[in-house]
């Protein structure tokens, strides 16, 4: 992934997102120990300053073309963590970067509604389908049909390319 318009849009709107309902802290504050103990935990957790250096390395891995890295306030607004295979993974939320379990349903009520009003639209925009929709859609005669895939999923149902592992110490 490059750091072009997608990253700029993500960084520009980071402050406009409401907090995720299931964002929490690791019990005792040691997310590495928690993940090692539980293995898989889909709870989305808030940024921890104790992981700052590793979070910055992860940001650079996900956005190698970025001119700079987020400051502490941006990391607090954007960085989210979860556990998979006993490791800590990080994602950076943004306009088109959903750090949530993805919607893998083939039927999409938002796409259906959009196509009723825009019978031959191609494509159906993400504001209608939801940014977490795995599939992309187009309208044919007022009906939504799948025309591709927006996201490949990891075994836990999250977008693979948005999450990266925080290195073990």
Image (tube, rainbow, N blue to C red):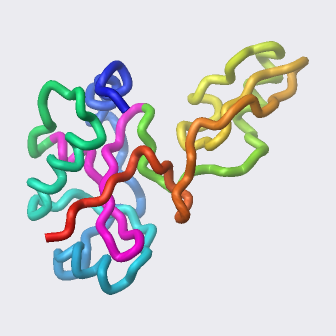
Identified at 37% across, 32% down, the residue is: 1
Does 167 sit left or right of 165 as displayed? left
Residue 24 locus on image (x, y percent): 31, 67
Q: Residue at x 16, y 61 (%)?
A: 48
| Residue 44, quarter of picture | bottom left
- Residue 86 image position (x, y, % from top left): 35, 76
Q: Is residue 129 left or right of residue 25?
A: right
Indicate the quadrant where residue 129 lies. top right
- Queried whether the magenta region covers residue 62, the answer comes back as no
**Residue in the foreground of this view, choosing between 14 and 158:** 158
Query: Which residues are drawn in magenta?
Result: 74-95
Q: Is residue 87 magenta?
A: yes
Residue 163 pos. (x, y %)? 38, 51
Left of 155 or right of it: where is 112?
right
Image quarter where the C terminus lies is bottom left
Give the quadrant of residue 23. Answer: bottom left
Identity of the residue drawn at 18% across and 46% down: 75
């Amino acid at each position: 992934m490059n750091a072009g318009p997608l990253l700029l849009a993500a960084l520009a709107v980071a402050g406009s997102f409401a907090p995720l309902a299931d964002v929490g802290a690791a019990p005792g504050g040691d997310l590495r120990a928690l993940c090692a103990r539980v293995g898989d935990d889909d709870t989305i957790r808030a940024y921890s300053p104790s992981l700052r250096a590793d979070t910055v390395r992860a940001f650079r891995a996900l956005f190698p073309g970025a001119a700079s890295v987020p400051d502490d306030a941006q990391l607090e607004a954007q960085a989210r963590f979860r556990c998979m295979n006993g490791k800590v993974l990080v994602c950076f939320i943004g306009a088109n970067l959903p750090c949530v379990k993805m919607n893998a349903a083939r039927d999409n009520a938002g796409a259906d509604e959009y196509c009723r009003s825009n019978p031959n639209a191609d494509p159906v925009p993400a504001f209608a389908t939801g940014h977490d929709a795995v599939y992309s859609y187009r309208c044919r005669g007022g009906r939504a049909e799948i025309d591709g895939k927006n996201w490949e999923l990891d075994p836990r149902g999250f977008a693979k390319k948005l999450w990266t592992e925080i290195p073990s110490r």
